[in-house]
Image (tube, grey):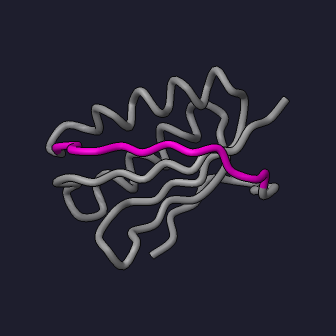
Amino acid sequence: MKKNQIIRIRGELGGTLFRQEARQKGEKLGLVGHAQIEPDGALRIDAEGDPDRLEEFVDWCKKGPEGTEVQQVHVADGELQGFDRFMEVR
């Protein structure tokens, strides 16, 4: 059963680095969704897929890629959106 989670990340995210790495990690885990920088500077990721894979993805988000510093991660369940791929929104 698929699940949707909305992940909001704050910190020193290296410009587009975190967003690009999150898309790649999500694809490797078989997740779909999108990642975008919000007007307040937080990175919002809407991800859908297997609950165990989502948990692994959230754990990765709490650390982030090398060269970034995650300060805060907030996760909330969302409504399934039916994404067909994982994409970055500019």
Residue in the picture at 36% in, 43% down: 73
Residue in the picture at 27% in, 38% down: 65
- Image quarter in which the C terminus is found: bottom left
Residue 22 highlighted magenta (yes or no): no
Camera-nearest residue between 78 and 83: 78
- x and y, in percent, of residue 24 in the image: 48, 44
Outermost residue, right side? 1
- x and y, in percent, of residue 51 in the image: 68, 26
- Image quarter in which the N terminus is found: top right
Q: Please give left or right for residue 41 compared with residue 27 in the image.
A: left
Using the image, determine if residue 11 lies above or below residue 51: below
Camera-nearest residue between 74 and 41: 74
- x and y, in percent, of residue 11 in the image: 20, 52
Residue 77 highlighted magenta (yes or no): yes
- Magenta: predominant secondary structure element? strand
Residue in the picture at 47% in, 33% down: 58
Camera-nearest residue between 1 and 77: 77
For residue 2, which quarter of the picture?
top right
Where are the magenta residues, as a range?
69-80
Using the image, determine if residue 25 lies above or below residue 84: above
- Count of numbered marks: 0
- x and y, in percent, of residue 7 in the image: 49, 48
Residue in the picture at 56% in, 50% down: 6
Q: Please give left or right for residue 23 compared with residue 46 in the image.
A: left
